[in-house]
Amino acid sequence: MFIKIIFSYLLGFLRISVEGYYIERFINICKNRKITIWNLKRNSNISLLLNVRINEFKDVCKIAKKTGSKLKIKNKKGLPFLLHRYKKRKIFLILLLLVVILIGLSSVFVWNVDISVEDNEELVNIREDLESAGLKTGILKSKINTKEIINKIRLEREDVAWMGIELKGTNAIVRVVKTDEKPEIIDDDEYCNIVSNKSGVITKISAQEGTANVKVGDTIKEGDVLINGWMEGKFTGIRYVHAKGEIEAKVWYTKSKKVPYTFTETQDTGNEENKYGIKFGNFEINFSKKYSKFEIYDTIETENKIRLFSDFYLPISIIKTTYKEKKEAQKTYTVEEAKNIGIKELEEELDKEIENKDNIVNKNINTYEQVDGVEVYVTYEVLENIGTNEKIVF
Amino acid sequence: MKNRKQHSRVDKFLEFPKEVYSNEPKVVVTGFDELIIENFKGILEYEEFFVRINTYIGIININGYNLNLENMTNDDLKVRGKIESIEFERTID
């Protein structure tokens, strides 16, 4: 019966009221003629409400005449009536079709290219390279040959270790793994010098192969030759070798900074202002004026792509611009405070730069008080192995 | 009548449901609000507070209020509403 009712929604049915004195007879005749009627409801007076299918309505009319009761159509329901109503609304139908077709068509294109590099490293110009290789927004999905694109990019770029392109809905998700930059390796059988890569004072030098060019205590600059890649024998003359050796030097790391006594501190006031805009491709529409009402503020822009389903992105995005109001306050340091702040900041910077902290021999801090601030100099003395190979060019 | 009895013996043996092979009605009451009658002959009276249904072996009276005949097919009738009492009137023994 339930399926029958659903079926009658498709065929269309009428809710009619029957008024008369022989309603029971009417029902029985309907039953005997195998006419499906349902949801019969008796009003307190002499009328009866019931549902009947439209193809059986003519028979019901005849029965009503026979029993001498009046028929009245209260409601028309079902698909045929719905379609009939929309027959007149041609523009609506055309637009509906157009929307469906547009959605279908736009799902064939790629509207969003997501590039994620492993470990959040940065690859310069990867987007441009992808575009020139054939993966850009607005391209047909069937035209994308992921293997070809990956091969092209891996041929072009040396810093890409692995690359994967996944087409998901209208998204193209590109995953890239960056290779570690490999240092230039000079083969053992090639001739080379050892050249300083830092400036400092030599504390130890031992040449296993080649001739030492500097002595202990010598001050060296960057680029100075430390061990020459040749040996001089009494009888053999000059013979070129692949220089090898260990050089230890005292290297100074110096940082300076001027800490002023008076400074301005910015603070969030907590006031925010949101403005919205719509972006189609490169075309932007702002709903309100771009300028904020605040005097001092930070701007944060976020872009949200509109999507229909979980991964069906449209080439439209909503841009939200948040302005955060800031407050500026003048503050002053005492001499001691300024000094301490300067020293602390510089030490932190230096600690980041020096890898091996055990080799720090000496720390040197100098401060010079001036009218408007304190100049702080922090110097670290570090023992380090220095020297890199450099090919001998004849 | 003889033929019918023979019929019923075979059907009993095969464990057919009674309402399928005979004209006897089956009345199912679900809760106090719903009543389904199979094998009915016709409706004698239908008011909002009273339904009188004719079957092959007698008459069923249903008292209550807001009574609707929800589904009606050839051998199936569903009465929904606040049912207060159900009475049977035998017409054959």
Image (tube, rainbow, N blue to C red):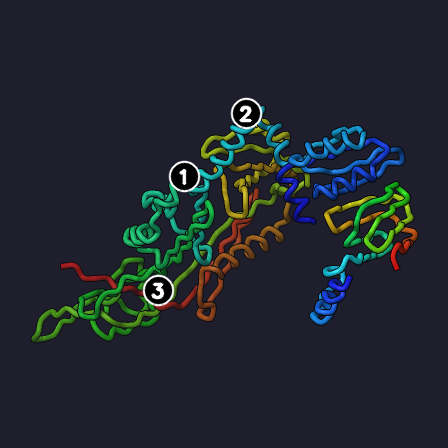
Name the residue at 21% across, 67% down. A187
Which is more foreground, mark 3 or mark 2? 2
**Residue, disc 2:** A90
Closer mark to the observer between disc 1 and disc 3: 1
Relative side of B93 to A223, left or right? right
Q: CA distance from mark 1 to mark 2?
A: 32 Å
How far apart, in angstroms, are the residues tagged by discs 3 and 2? 90 Å
Tell me the subunit letter for badge 3.
A
**Residue A115 visible, this angle:** no
**Is disc 3 on the same chain as disc 1?**
yes
Estimate the x, y position of residue A175 in percent, counting from the top left. Answer: 42, 54
Task: Determine the secondary structure under disc 2.
Answer: helix
Residue with the mark numbered 3: A201
User: Residue A138's mark?
Assistant: 1
Q: Chain of mark 1?
A: A
Q: The numbered mark 2 sits on a residue in which chain?
A: A
Q: Report whether A34 appears left or right of A102.
A: right
Quadrant of residue A262 within the rendered picture? top right
Residue A312 rendering spot, x and y as whole percentages: 50, 44
Q: Residue at x 60, y 29 (%)?
A: A84
Please tell me whether mark 1 sits on a helix, a strand or a loop.
loop
In the image, residue A314 sits, relative to residue A213, either above or below, namely above
Q: Is residue A79 above or below residue B24?
A: above
**Which secondary structure, mark 3?**
strand
Residue occupying the point 38% across, 40% down: A139
Quick one: B8 or A149, which is closer to the camera?
B8
Along the viewing direction, whichever of B60 and A190 lies nearer the viewer: B60
Which residue lies at the image location 42% right of the left edge and 53% below the top edge? A166
Front one among A244 and A30: A30
The image's mark for residue B49 is none
Which comes before the other along the chain, label 1 or label 3?
Answer: 1
- Whichever of labels 3 and 2 marks the residue nearer the N terminus, that label is 2
